[in-house]
Amino acid sequence: MIVISDTSVITNLAAIHQLKLLSQLYNQVTIPEAVYRELVDIEPPVPGTLEVQEAAWLEVRALVNRMQNCC
């Protein structure tokens, strides 16, 4: 199963100290680079900022525009 998360899921779970639920439910969670930047490139830090930088179960991937090569 592929699981892709947005910023709100991570920040809300981190705020209630339950971000570990994602790793318990899913072995691997993917977030787009933009979501990662929203979490780590912000001042002041938001819930989840430190956690996403250290989480081995979280994969950051660049988005690929498949329509760009189409037609």
Image (cartoon, rainbow, N blue to C red):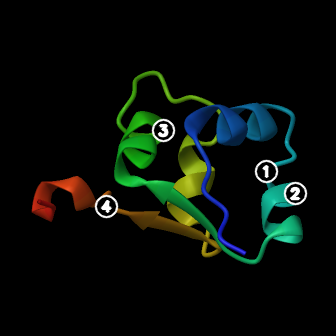
Disc assigned to residue 62: 4
Relative placement, left or right, of 32 versus 67 is right
Report the residue marked by disc 2: 21
Relative placement, left or right, of 31 versus 10 is left
CA–CA distance between discs 2 and 1? 5 Å
Of 6 and 52, the residue lying toward us: 6
Report the residue marked by disc 1: 19
Residue visible at 43% across and 48% down?
36
Q: Is residue 65 visible?
A: no
Whether residues under marks 2 and 1 lie with C-beta atoms below 8 angstroms apart, the answer is: yes
Kind of residue at badge 2? Leu
Kind of residue at badge 3? Leu
Quadrant where the N terminus sits is bottom right
Report the residue marked by disc 3: 39
Residue visible at 87% across and 57% down?
21
Label located before the other in sequence (4 or 2): 2
Label located before the other in sequence (3 or 2): 2
CA–CA distance between discs 4 and 2? 24 Å
SS label for mark 1 = loop
Label located before the other in sequence (3 or 1): 1
Label located before the other in sequence (3 or 4): 3
CA–CA distance between discs 3 and 4? 15 Å
Q: Residue 37: x, y in percent? A: 36, 42
Q: Residue 11: x, y in percent? A: 67, 34
Whether residues under marks 3 and 1 lie with C-beta atoms below 8 angstroms apart, the answer is: no
SS label for mark 4 = loop
